[in-house]
Every structure is written in structure tokens, then in C-alpha cells.
Amino acid sequence: MPYASRTCAPSMIVLALLAAVLTLPAPVHAQDGARGEETEVVINAPGHPLLQGFRWRSIGPTGQGGRVDDLAVHPEDTRIFYVGFATGGLWKTTNNGTTFESIFDSYETHSIGALALAPSDPDILYVGTGEANNRQSSSFGYGVYKSTDGGATFVHAGLRETQSIARVLVHPTNPDVVWVAAVGHLFGPNAERGVFKSSDGGESWRHVLAVDEDTGATDLVMDPSNPDVLFASTYQRRRTVCCFVGGGPGSGIWQSEDGGESWSPVEGAGLPAGTLGRIALAMTPADPDIVYAQVEVAADRELPLSEEEQDEWRRLARVDSLPPDPQWSGVWRSTDKGRTWEFRSNENGRPMYFSQIRVSPEDPDLVYTVDQRVSKSRDGGRTWEVLSGYGHVDQHALWIDPADHDHLVIGNDGSVDVSWDQGETWESLRPWAVGQPYHASVDMRRPYYVCTGLQDNGSWCGPSSVRSGPILSQDWYRVGGGDGFYTQVDPTDPAIVFVESQNGRLRRVDLREGVSRPITPRVPDEEDPADTNIAPAPPFDAAIRWNWNTPFLLSPHNPRILHAGGNRFFTSRDRGETWTMSPDLTKDVDRDAEVLMGVVNGIPRCSRFERGTECTLSRNDGVSMWGSMTSIAESPIVPGVFWAGTDDGNIQVSRDGGATWTEVSRNLPGGTTRHYVSRVEASHVDAATAYVSIDGHKNDDLRPYVYVTRNYGATWEDITSNLPSFGNVNTVRQDPRNPRLLYVGTEFGFYVSFDEGGSWHDFMPGLPVVRIDDVLVHPRENDLVLATHGRSVYVLDDVTALQALADSVLASDAHLFDPRPAVLWKNDLQRRRSLTGDRNWTGESAPPGTMIQYYLGSPADVSIEVSELASGRVVRELDGTGRPGLNRVAWDLRMNPALQGQGGDGLPVSPGMYRVTLTVGEATHSTLLEVLEDRWLQAP
């Protein structure tokens, strides 16, 4: 397959094309022929002339929503509200959730932390970006944005370096007075954290509450009777690739009586004495003297329990009968604006990740907290009932209607749920594709199916396209549980699917038999040395560590061979029944010796039973193991050439089927790091060549890093080139047909290189700004498939023209590419469904027919004819676009309407061979196109 050489790009030809295309109108997407003027303008359209005419399409899944971080509801019309997602952008409804519009697709970030409408002018919306939920998969913000037209447009309003914002408040009568609670960098220290105030609508900010470079503000509430009285909570925390510390001397509650100009700590007077972690706050207009605080606290300053007392407390915990403990995490209440406090209960589930409390605007004793569940108290937080019926676990946002406290809206890891009866019943809103996939795989059906693993939503498979109509939510089916990550489908049998959930829980699924079988490699039990599926049997104390996102793959040479990566490299030759095991390939660092914010990670996690001793709040939450593989690959050229990247920075290569390994990250420019190796990609044309992306964001380094080796890692070349400096790289792929064509997914977008990393170009037509975790090229269709961590799965149809780019093509006046074979799809009557109303998500199927793709060296008048090869009869005439660069014109496999003697779309052609003729000025170019009969429709 020809490809563009490295010296060609950026070439004078391409630069001339760029200059020419800049003078042309914005690109549009042509559906059939070149009727571009009748179609929509494509968001984030690329400027490169070789990338025009493409468009990404969303295929789902949708019922498996993404994490909601905040809600903002119009104070005068509750049918209008906004939903901010952790990695899925910002959405607006004007009809009470019947439909939503994505309104933040082209800004610098997709991660929303906090939303606030100005009460005195609800067209003004402030958006604090960067989620504040502290998890290992959290993304980053870019500061504050402001809209003055109800979300139609936004301007950046500063505080870029905050990275995560937990709360925004707007003055009730002056929309220019705004307060921001910024938690700050999650993975490192920074000064831009704490409480900020603007008096000019975000034009400038003053840092009014600053503790230190490790402590930010995680909540902010206003006295409903006096906007000069504010309460804030601060939170000292730090996460790294290995560890988490969620508390310290910086955490606390603060009060201001002058509109946030000055602050004083709120301490003692009934509050707990131990080390504090994350704190949530709430007030209510029903009684402005009441303040609620949901406090994470250690019992590290209490007298220790005796062994007998510990045993008794543990016994009581097993039967859920522990007595109230005022020195352990829970809910406190003040009835005098924070002067004194009373302990109410120990209601506080996983505070590092949740910590949200709300009070009814009508009844100061009606309180809600959200964590994995939604809990409700009718007696001011003393006793709680757990609500049920909402659509998902893990709640992060809750809004109570100020005019009707029966009306609730919650946001969770499944999207949004609404109640009109104080949580007795719920309606789930799922009209969007905002899932958080980590990876994608494909099968070889026609149309092919895509499988993917979703954060907190299991693993799913669904069609890349359907024969007629849109893709529906119901077209996706579940194949795995837990947090979904990698999936693989046997290319010879789509009924065999391999899935993985957190920490190495591998399963083989047989859809034909309806069986899901665990296949994780396991060491023997001490009492039963034969109870292992690893050969030779390792000792019972052999350490196996799995990444939260464990990589595995089917061998490209034999789909019965399965490889998986923990801290060791595992190979199975019988679909996971038995395994072989390598030595430890990580740096094997003792994470207990790591130090975060001066805290040695070996200090134990705080426990309710271990009192009066030094401890760490939320220690290592979300990272149960460290020192494991994050990416593995096998050369498609030579069996047994393996590559492995780890979360502690190693890159290992084996050239003998895993018998021996060589660590080669030390040869990277600048030497090895402890950065996370996000992808190792074995070359499709040379066994000695591999590509690596390095992700440093968990060490507070957001820069991109991409490298290539051509000698098994002995040396590496930096090919990061002109990738944006803000945004770590999550994946790199080489095109299987054009070795110079590379794809990169970053935290904020998708890029392509025509010259093996010499230069990069954004490639996001129709794709929102979103985190890209994985990309693959379908081996038959040559579509690109993206796993976007926030907007589910996207497909870009038919990149065969990009794969066929060569120097000779770019030097020509015009070139017609060979079209991909087209399938004349039959009508699938089994998929006829009654879909009523507008509260339904629909995905976009591939356009029918095929793309006719051609290159023009300069603007030209173009026409296209399609004729029967056997008879020469012209069956379709199409208007072609005449832009310099790559042009794509869709043919829907229908004849000219005149050939049937009537109007309409024209009759479909018959399967067979056709000639496509491109006329450019006086010159003609032709190629052949095969139209295939649909032989793959299955009936019962």
C-alpha cells in the first residue's frame, strides 16, 4: 500500500494547499453528491485540506451515562436547566429534560466542576471547569467561563490554573459579584486554589481565602438572609499515580461576614477534634441560622480503644449497630450560624469522592446526603433512610426546587434522575451518549459491532451501524459488569467476547451459550498448592498486582492466544483456561515509602476502631495496587515480539515469546521517568518499531509525550512535535495500511500525522472537545473507532483515501482513489420499532453506499458519473466538490431519478461492478467500484 514519505509533509505542496483552502468557505458535510449548501456546518472542522469532508458520528451507548458533577436550574422556569458532566461537557434543556443540547463542544475543556446562574439575571451562567471529585480518572479544567446569553456563547473568565472547581456562587442581586471555591491541582501543589472573588463579572479576581499550595476550597454556601455571610470549607489533598492522601491541617471550615473579603476559621464549639478531610456545607432559607456540615474526620486525637473494645465495636459493625461516634466522620449542625455545633449522626459515605449535603428550602429538618446512595433525614440529620428507585449509584449532585421541595434532581454516574415526591419515585433522563469508555474493540460482522468498557457502567457491545433507521439505545447489550475497561472479540467468532473489570477481573463470555466464565490468572492457595491456573505453579506468596485498568489482548496471529498484563506478563494458549507467567516487569517500588505532602504513605488508613494513632484519611482511595502494566502489544509481523508499558514508567520488550525481557524506557530522551505509559503500539510493518505515549498528568505534568523506536527500544525519537502543550496523550496508533499515518488521542482531542509524527493536525469534524482514551482502525472497513471518555463511542467512516496518500498523489493535478466496496443493505424488518416522543436518544448509522474520494491540486470544476461496467450505461450523475485537497462525495447506490421515469430518490442499483468516472476540467479519471449483495442479514 503506498504512503506519503516523511520528507513530503509538511511539503510545499501541502503548504500551498493550506493557503488555498484558507480562502474558501467553512467546510460542510455532503450527504449525497455535493449538496453541501443544504447540510449543517460541522463543529471543530479541521483546517487541513487533506482532512475535509470527514465527519465523526456518535453510535452510543447511551443508557449507560457518564458522571454528572453539577446542576443549575433556572430560578423562574424550572423547565430550563443545565447539566455539567465530569468529562462529557455541558448540556441544556428548555423542556424539562425531554431533549438536551450540548452547548460546550468547542471550548478548551470538557470537564465541568460547578455551575451557577445569576439569580437576578438567569441568562448569565458561570461555569467552573474541572471536576472536584478527586478520583484517579478525574480530568482537568481551564478555569471559569461565562455566558450572558443563556449558554449560547461563552467567554473565558480566568483562573486557568485552578484545574478543578468545586463551587460557584453568584450574588442574589448583583450578577457581577461572584465567588469561586477552587480545589486546585489534584496531582501536585499550586498557588491558585482556595476562594476567589470577582466584583466585575469575572474580568478580574481576588484571592480572598488562601491556606497553602496543598489546600483548596471544596464547598461554599451563602446565608440566604444576608449575602455578606459566607461559609467555606477547605480541603488538603493530593493524589499521585500510586497513592492518595485526603486530609491534613489545611482542611477546615471558615466564615466570612463581609462578603468574602476576610475569613476566620470555625473551630471547636462541638466540632470534632481530629484531623479533617473533605467537608460539605449547606444552609436553608427555612432557617438561616442553621448550618449543616458533613465532615470527614479521623479519630486520631482520641484515647485508643482496648483490644476488648475494638472487638466489641467490630462485632457491632457487623450487625450495623455501632453507637453514634462524635469523633468520626458524619453530620454536624449549628443552629446559631456556626458559633456552636452539635453532632447528629455518622452519615458520610466515601467522603473523598462525594461529600454533598442539601437542606429543604421549606423544612430545616429535611436533609439529604448523596454518596453511593441517596439518603434522607426528616429529623435534622439524626436518623436516615436510604432512598431507592433512581437510575444509578454514585451520586454527585442534588438540587431541591426552592419553590417546591418535593421536586428533586440528582446527578450521578448514570446521568440525571428526577423526583416529584421527595424521592419516593424517580424518572431517569438518558437522552444523550455521555458514557465514559476506556477502550474499544470490534468484530467482523456486517455491519460490524463495537464493544467497549465504561466507567462504573460495565462492558457493552452495539452496532457500528444498522441497515435502516437510527441506532437505538436498545441495540446495545451488556457483556460485563463493574467498571468496564478492555474488551476483545474473537475475529473468527463474534459470540466469544473477553471483558475485564477493575483490578484484573478477566472473563470469557460465550453469547451463544449464555455463559460468562472468570479466567483471571491466580496463584495457588497456601492450603491447596494445586489450586492455580498458572503453569508452572508459582509459590502461593508470589505477588500479582493488577492495574485498575488491566490491559489484555488477543494475539493477532491466533485468536485462541490471550495475553494479559499485571506486574507480570501472562499468556494463555487456550482462551484463558491456563496461563504462563513472567517475572515482575515493573520498577516494584515500595509505595509505602512514598511521601505526599510530607505524609509517608506507609501510615495506615484511618479507621473508626484504631483511635488515638497517626493515620491517613482516604489513604490510597481508588488505587488498590501500584506497579503494574497499563499497555501491552504483540507485533503483528513477528509472533512472540511483545511490548509492555507500566504505571511506574517501565517499557519492556521481549523478542523470544516472553522468555526474556529488556527494560528500554531508560533509553528515552532524558531517561526513564515514573510517568504512566499510556500506550505501547507495535508497528504493523516492522517488528523492531514501536510507538509509545507517556502520560505524566498523575505527576502533575500535562504535557504530551510521544516516541518511536526502530531498534527494539535501543534508541527513541521524540515525535511529539506540535501537539498542543496542554493535554497529556492517552493513546497512539499506527495505521495498519499506511505506516506514516499515525493517530493520537489526548485529554482534549484527536490528532493525525501524515509523516509519522513530524507534524500533527487536529482531526475532529463533528467531534466535541473530549478526552480520547482509545482509537482503532477496523481491519476490513478501515473506519476509525474512538473510545471517548465522556461522549461514548464515535466512528469516522472510510479513511481509505488517507491510507492511500502518496507523493505521486500530492504532486498530481487530480487523483481518484479506489472506493471501498459498498453493500446494498437489505431492509431488516426485525428492527422495525415503534419509537414515540422526543425523549429518545438515536445514534447515527453510516451513510448508505460509499464515498467517492479524490484529490485536487487546485480549485476545479468537477463532475462524477457512475456507470454499469458491463453495459456502460450511466446510472448516476453527481456534482463533485472542487476544493483543493481531499474531496469526498457520497453515493447512496441509487440511480438518477429520471431513469425510473419519475421523481424521488431514484431506484437502488443492483449488486455488481460499476465504473466511477471523475471529470476535472477536460481530464477524466476512472476506477472500479464493487456493490455487494447483503448476504449477512440473519433471520430467526
Image (cartoon, rainbow, N blue to C red):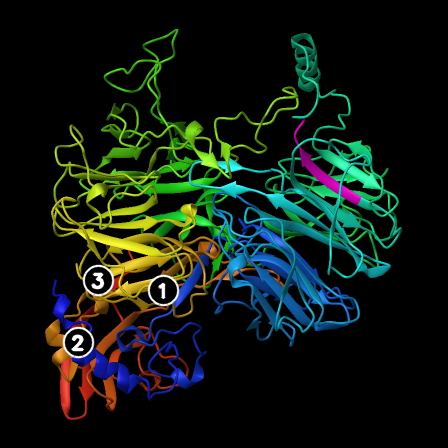
Q: Distance between the residues labelled 1 and 2?
A: 21 Å
Determine the residue positioned at 14% across, 76% down.
809
Q: Nearer the viewer, residue 815 or 473?
A: 815
- Badge 2, how many Cα within 10 Å: few under 14, some, many 20+? few
Q: Name the residue under label 2.
A: 11
Determine the residue positioned at 73% across, 34% down.
330
Determine the residue positioned at 23% across, 65% down.
800
Q: Where is residue 683 drawn, in percent x and y?
A: 18, 50
Q: Where is residue 721 drawn, in percent x and y?
A: 26, 63
Q: What residue type is labelled 3?
A: Leu
Q: Which amino acid does label 2 sit on?
A: Ser
The reply to whether residue 797 is visible in this rendering is yes
> Which circle's residue, 1 or 2, is located before the other in the chain?
2
| Mark 3 or mark 1, whichever is nearer to me | 1
Is residue 296 part of the magenta span, yes or no?
yes
Q: In which quarter of the image is residue 12?
A: bottom left
Q: Which amino acid does label 1 sit on?
A: Pro
Q: Distance between the residues labelled 2 and 3?
A: 15 Å
Local SS, label 1: loop
Q: Which of 874 and 256 is in front in this view?
A: 256
> Which circle's residue, 2 or 3, is located before the other in the chain?
2
Task: Tell how many labels.
Answer: 3
Q: Is residue 38 left or right of residue 83?
A: left
Q: Name the residue under label 1.
A: 724
Q: In this view, does 922 lie above or below 674?
A: below
Local SS, label 3: loop
**Helix, strand or loop for the magenta stretch, by majority:** strand
> What range is drawn magenta here?
292-299
| Mark 1 or mark 2, whichever is nearer to me | 1
